[in-house]
Image: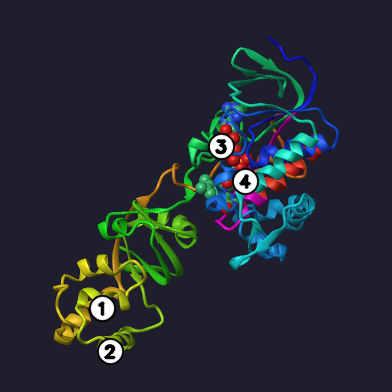
């Protein structure tokens, strides 16, 4: 069965990038078909920013912004000139979704709802009369003379003048991003830089971390050691989970920790009072203890530990919890101070694709015409979003790439 020649453009993959591309092409008057293998579009978009969607990063200085994309920065100037951060603000605000800028210039919808971001794109597709076929897994491309002749979905064939590939990377495969596009692109002759999970939590051995799953340690300093040599110190918040450490600070450090893991045994210490040295913290705690002399350690511990961590820290101290504060020896107090300055963590590795925010790797930008996002190897194929090899931290930089590359491809076809 053949679905005629009625499409100008077929977009494969209905994530953030594919929806933007399909909407833009349709806005320009193209007849667009969007094929998505899931029942619904935008499954990953809906879980971004823990459901709040860090939609872009509001860094106004283009040099500072592009520096976040590492070696890809030099390729992206012209792309961001076509559709940059200001355009993202305008795009969503014009469509009734105001954005707000929070710490580290992270921008979110004012409603803090990723679903609202999705709804704007859904409406954009509807207004452009994009035909959407869900539950349609593209199986393969048929190539002739460096052009895609048709694509195959089960028993069906689809034909268009141009094709936009937006099947995503490999992180959180349950959302549909299973790396299908990488296989086709490799067959086409594209070099695929092996995807690895990059912005990803860290797995740890320590039970105390797992016992505190869900707790955020605020304003701490974490020191990483490679074979006992201090190699990196970072300040910020760390989220403890049932598998290890997470939160933006950790996610953005994962790339460096991956290198450390290649070099040796990686351990870390968490300093819960980075603004005190050991002596200063001892004084601070002594002051608190002096006012609570008749309490048991079990009751006093929460006065000197981050919220929600008292009992677990008590179990690490290995001092009788029933001891009265006025009976604590100087050495016992020292044990407490030392532990609060250096909670020990053994890093066993990075979590996998199922927990990664972004997988690195994909098509190198040298194989793409950045002004149009067209493949240099296949004349009627455009490649966008997480399929591209562009390293970046967490902070809204990934979705901005989807808006930018999706818009350009949609405009170019
Ligand atoms: C938990 C999490 C939180 C995140 N939070 C943020 C954030 O707050 N800010 C930010 O900037 N970035 C964030 N990211 C990263 C961001 O979500 C991605 O960079 C972005 O969604 C990628 O969009 P995409 O359209 O390229 O690919 P995807 O969203 O992966 O979409 C690809 C689509 O293609 C479909 N598909 C795949 N194979 C086929 C096939 N064979 N046939 C048909 N369809 C197919 C998939 O089902 C999927 O719908 C987060 C990622 C995760 C996992």
161 over 205 or under it: above or below: above
Per the model, the C-alpha gap separating discs 2 and 4 is: 50 Å
Instruction: Determine contact: label 3, label 4, CB under 8 Å.
Output: no
What's the residue at 60%, 52% (across, down)? Answer: 53
- Nearer the camera: disc 3 or disc 2: 2
Out of 58 and 191, give the one closest to the viewer: 58
Ligand 1 found in image quarter: top right
The secondary structure type at the circle numbered 1 is: helix
Out of 108 and 34, give the one closest to the viewer: 108
| Earlier residue among tags 3 and 1 | 3
Q: Which mark is residue 192?
A: 3
| Earlier residue among tags 2 and 1 | 2
| Earlier residue among tags 2 and 4 | 4
Q: In the figure, is residue 239 to the left or right of 179? A: left
Mark 3, Cα crowd under 10 Å, few <14 / some 14-19 / many 20+, is: some
Instruction: Determine contact: label 3, label 1, CB under 8 Å.
Output: no
Magenta part of the protein: which range? 379-400
The secondary structure type at the circle numbered 3 is: loop
Per the model, the C-alpha gap separating discs 3 and 1 is: 56 Å
Per the model, the C-alpha gap separating discs 3 and 2 is: 63 Å
Q: Which mark is residue 115?
A: 4
Out of 73 and 271, give the one closest to the viewer: 271
Determine which quarter of the picture holds residue 27.
top right
Q: Position of residue 349 (x, y in %)?
A: 35, 51
Name the residue at the top extreme. 1
What's the residue at 27%, 88% (across, down)? Answer: 286
Mark 1, Cα crowd under 10 Å, few <14 / some 14-19 / many 20+, is: some
Residue, disc 2? 291
Determine which quarter of the picture holds residue 33.
top right
Residue, disc 1? 300
Query: What colour scheme governs how the chains and residues are painted in the rendered image of this protein?
Result: rainbow
């Amino acid at each position: 069965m053949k679905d005629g020649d009625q499409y100008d453009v077929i977009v494969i993959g209905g994530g953030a990038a594919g929806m933007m591309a399909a909407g833009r092409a349709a806005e320009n008057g193209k007849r667009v078909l969007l094929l998505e293998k899931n029942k619904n579009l935008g499954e990953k978009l809906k879980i971004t920013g823990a459901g709040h969607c860090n939609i872009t990063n509001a860094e106004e200085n283009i040099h500072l912004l592009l520096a976040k994309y590492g070696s890809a920065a030099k390729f992206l100037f012209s792309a961001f000139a076509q559709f940059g951060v200001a355009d993202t603000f305008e795009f969503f605000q014009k469509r009734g979704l105001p954005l707000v800028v929070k710490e580290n210039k992270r921008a979110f919808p004012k409603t803090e709802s990723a679903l609202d971001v999705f709804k704007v794109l859904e409406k954009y597709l509807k207004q452009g009369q994009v035909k959407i076929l869900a539950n349609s897994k593209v199986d393969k491309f048929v190539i002739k003379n460096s052009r895609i002749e048709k694509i195959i979905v089960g028993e069906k064939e689809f034909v268009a003048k141009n094709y936009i590939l937006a099947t995503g990377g490999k992180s959180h495969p349950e959302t549909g991003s299973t790396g299908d596009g990488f296989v086709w692109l490799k067959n086409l002759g594209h070099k695929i830089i092996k995807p690895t999970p990059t912005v990803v939590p860290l797995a740890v051995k320590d039970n105390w971390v797992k016992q505190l799953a869900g707790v955020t340690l605020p304003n701490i300093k974490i020191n990483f050691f490679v074979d006992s040599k201090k190699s990196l110190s970072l300040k910020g918040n760390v989220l403890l989970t049932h598998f290890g450490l997470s939160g933006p600070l950790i996610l953005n450090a994962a790339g460096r920790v991956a290198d450390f893991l290649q070099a040796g045994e990686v351990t870390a210490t968490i300093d819960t009072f980075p603004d005190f040295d050991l002596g200063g913290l001892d004084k601070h705690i002594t002051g608190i203890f002096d006012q609570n002399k008749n309490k048991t350690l079990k009751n006093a511990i929460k006065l000197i530990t981050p919220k929600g961590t008292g009992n677990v820290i008590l179990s690490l101290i290995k001092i009788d919890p029933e001891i009265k504060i006025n009976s604590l020896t100087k050495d016992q107090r020292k044990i407490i101070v030392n532990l609060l300055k250096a909670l020990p963590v053994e890093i066993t590795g990075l979590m996998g694709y199922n927990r990664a925010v972004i997988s690195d790797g994909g098509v190198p930008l040298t194989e793409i015409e950045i002004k149009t996002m067209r493949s240099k190897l296949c004349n009627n194929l455009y490649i966008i979003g997480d399929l591209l090899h562009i390293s970046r931290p967490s902070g809204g930089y990934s979705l901005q790439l989807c808006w930018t590359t999706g818009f350009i491809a949609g405009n170019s076809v």
